Amino acid sequence: RIDRIVGRGSTATVAIATDALLGSESGPRRVVLKRFEADASGHALRHARRELATLLTLPDRCAPKVLGFHADRAGGAILVTAWEPSSPPRHLGELPRQRLVPRP
């Protein structure tokens, strides 16, 4: 069930949804659906596959967990990832000071 649309771009629409089938005994699971709209040029499907490949190559905990990917014959695709709430952005001045270059 789609709960809300959170963004629309030139190639995709992103929604937060609830998936009872992926849930556990404690309840349904929240997921993010990213629907890449089919176009005559095939750019949407290439973009979707590139995004999927990028997510799968990132180290654990650096990207949302990929739960599924579906490409249709019309050239569209849906990428399903686990929904992971994020904290609000912090101002650079609030971050602890660290040396960016290690000492020799």
Image (spheres, rainbow, N blue to C red):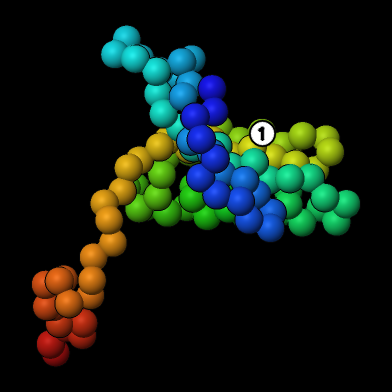
Q: Where is residue 71 drawn, in percent x and y?
A: 72, 37
- Residue shown at 54%/40% (left/top)? 5
- Confirm whether residue 53 shows in the render: no
- Residue shown at 61%/51% (left/top)? 8
Q: Where is residue 100 drawn, in percent x and y?
A: 21, 82
Question: Image quarter for residue 91?
Answer: bottom left
- Confirm whether residue 99 shows in the render: yes
- Residue shown at 11%/78% (left/top)? 97
24 relative position to 81: left or right:
left
- Residue shown at 46%/24% (left/top)? 18
41 relative position to 69: left or right:
right
Q: Mark 1 points at which residue?
A: 70
Q: Look at label 1 and name its amino acid.
A: His
Q: Where is residue 96 drawn, in percent x and y?
A: 11, 72
Q: Residues within 10 Å of mark 1 (few under 14, many from 20)?
A: few
Q: Where is residue 95 drawn, in percent x and y?
A: 16, 71
* Quadrant of the rendering where the N terminus is positioned: top right
Q: In this view, does 6 lie above or below 47?
A: above
Question: Image quarter for residue 37?
Answer: top right
Instruction: List the single residue furthest toward the front.
Output: 4
Secondary structure, mark 1, is strand
Instruction: List the single residue furthest toward the bottom.
Output: 104
* Quadrant of the rendering where the C terminus is positioned: bottom left
